[in-house]
């Protein structure tokens, strides 16, 4: 991850000079600016004053009656105290007449438009998914879960008779409050007998949607900017948000994928500019280094244990040399194991029992060919790969194919809105 020093500890240097000041025959402000860029400063700005006076108390102004060819110039640069101190030492001999000040500042955001390709000025209504299924508060939980299964939707907004959003029913709500045995991605891979068993149990439940749904629900207005919506979604760790109109009526849903597609569809090339020193450029800088792995020869019981220990829904499968050769999701296990051990796996995944001793190995259960990328792959290119291949995970590997880390959609979303996108 990027160094956080600029955000935690920064200073602003102000340099007051005159427009006519020179260094070795060149304008001093231009010389100082070139020096700052060469030293890798985070950024600098030159301001030309309309009027002012300095040590000699001479009025300098752009007004006709006191016209001056030596107007005041102010240069501002913000960086870490260490780099500011080194810069002051370097330029002090060059500022032979003028003033320099240093003060502590708080950096709220520091990024670069070529590192953040999100079209933040778009409206949510231009990006959202419009065809949205919704639940009602009085709907039985069993009926709601059946609807979610049929359409493979992990979260559905709940609306009243006026289409006002009153809550959202998520996969997690059903697991925690309604007695559902498995996550939706696992349930859709179960055979019909297991699904019917779950449905029969739910049909006997007196619970209604309003009793288990999440509320209040975080929504976004269709006329809000995509930048604001993305920041809210990343901050709250949400996968999707209901979109409402000015009257509060449901008009759509904004998902992570809706947002990431906007970046994936952006032009491939970016202008050839000198990007800020230390700016987040590569997938290695945003990846999680906590890589849950399993050897391709490991048995079923060991795989289930790894799922429980890692608290993850996916494991990277590696061969004898440590090279990534596949991915296993918990839903892969349910769909690909023998029926005789399937119920035992479902219970073990919920930590309600011991893993069954099935004959399958990780190699038998995995989806081969994980989406991989080198650590120096630009973040935007990695995002485009994930969207283009409809993958939720990107495995970052070294030159030998050994896993170094993982990148998922949430990490990509946070990268697009992150205020700490640079190092000092």
Image (cartoon, helix red, strand yellow):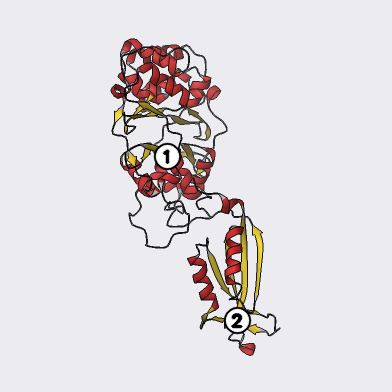
Between the C-alphas of marks 2 and 1, the distance is 51 Å
Q: Residues within 10 Å of mark 2 (few under 14, many from 20)?
A: many
Residue 351, percent across and down? Answer: 48, 16
Q: Nearer the viewer, residue 165 or 49?
A: 49
- Image coordinates for residue 193, horizontal then vertical, percent: 34, 12
Tally of numbered discs: 2
Closer-to-camera residue (24/209): 24
Please, is residue 340 above or below residue 283 in the view? above
Q: Position of residue 329 (x, y in %)?
A: 37, 26
- Is residue 189 visible from the viewing direction of this image? no
Q: Residues within 10 Å of mark 1 (few under 14, many from 20)?
A: some
Task: Answer with the quarter of the image where residue 101 lies.
Answer: bottom right
Mark number, residue 100: none
The residue that label 2 is drawn on is 71
- Residue drawn 37% across the image and 38% down it: 395
Q: Circle 1 sits on which residue?
A: 409
Give me the residue at 31% from left, 42% from top.
Answer: 388
Image quadrant of residue 94?
bottom right
Q: Residue at x 28, y 22 (%)?
A: 364
Q: Residue furthest bottom?
A: 65
Provide the secondary structure element on which disc 1 rests.
helix
Secondary structure under the numbered disc 2 in the rendered image: loop
Q: Please report contact status of discs 2 and 1: CB closer than 8 Å, yes or no.
A: no
Of pointers 2 and 1, the one earlier in the residue sequence = 2
The residue closer to the viewer here, 387 or 84, is 84
Q: Eyeballing the image, is 158 above or below 407? A: above
Q: Position of residue 47 (x, y in %)?
A: 57, 72
């Amino acid at each position: 991850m990027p160094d956080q020093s600029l955000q935690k500890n920064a200073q602003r240097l102000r340099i007051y000079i005159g427009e006519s000041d020179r260094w070795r025959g060149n304008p001093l402000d231009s010389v100082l600016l070139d020096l700052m860029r060469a030293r890798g400063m985070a950024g600098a700005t030159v301001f030309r004053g309309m009027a002012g006076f300095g040590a000699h108390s001479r009025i300098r102004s752009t007004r006709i009656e006191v016209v001056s060819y030596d107007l005041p110039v102010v240069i501002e640069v913000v960086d870490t105290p260490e780099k500011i101190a080194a810069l002051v030492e370097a330029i002090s001999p060059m500022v032979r007449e003028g003033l320099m000040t240093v003060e502590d500042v708080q950096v709220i955001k520091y990024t670069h438009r070529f590192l953040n390709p999100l079209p933040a000025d778009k409206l949510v209504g231009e990006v959202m998914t419009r065809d949205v299924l919704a639940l009602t508060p009085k709907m039985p939980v069993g009926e709601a879960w059946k609807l979610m299964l049929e359409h493979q939707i992990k979260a559905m907004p709940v609306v009243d008779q006026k289409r006002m959003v009153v809550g959202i029913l998520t996969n997690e709500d059903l697991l925690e409050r309604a007695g559902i045995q498995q996550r939706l991605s696992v349930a859709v891979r179960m055979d019909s007998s297991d699904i019917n068993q779950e449905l029969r149990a739910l049909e006997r439940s007196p619970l209604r949607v309003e009793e288990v749904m999440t509320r209040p629900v975080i929504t976004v207005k269709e006329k809000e900017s995509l930048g604001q919506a993305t920041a809210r979604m990343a901050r709250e760790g949400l996968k999707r948000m209901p979109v409402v109109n000015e009257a509060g009526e449901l008009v759509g849903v904004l998902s992570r994928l809706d947002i990431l597609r906007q970046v994936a569809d952006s032009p491939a090339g970016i202008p050839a500019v000198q990007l800020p020193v230390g700016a987040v450029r590569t997938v290695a800088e945003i990846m999680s280094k906590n890589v849950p792995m399993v050897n391709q020869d490991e048995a079923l019981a060991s795989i289930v244990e790894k799922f429980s220990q890692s608290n993850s829904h996916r494991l990277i499968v590696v061969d004898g040399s440590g090279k990534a050769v596949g991915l296993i999701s918990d839903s892969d296990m349910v769909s690909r194991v023998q029926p005789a051990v399937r119920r035992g796996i479902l219970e073990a995944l919920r930590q309600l029992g011991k893993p069954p001793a099935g004959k399958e190995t990780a190699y038998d259960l995995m989806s081969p060919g994980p989406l991989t990328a080198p650590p120096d792959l630009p973040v935007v290119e990695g995002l485009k790969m994930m969207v283009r291949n409809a993958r939720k995970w990107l495995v970052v590997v070294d030159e030998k194919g050994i896993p170094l880390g993982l990148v998922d959609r949430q990490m990509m979303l946070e990268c697009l809105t992150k205020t700490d996108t640079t190092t000092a």
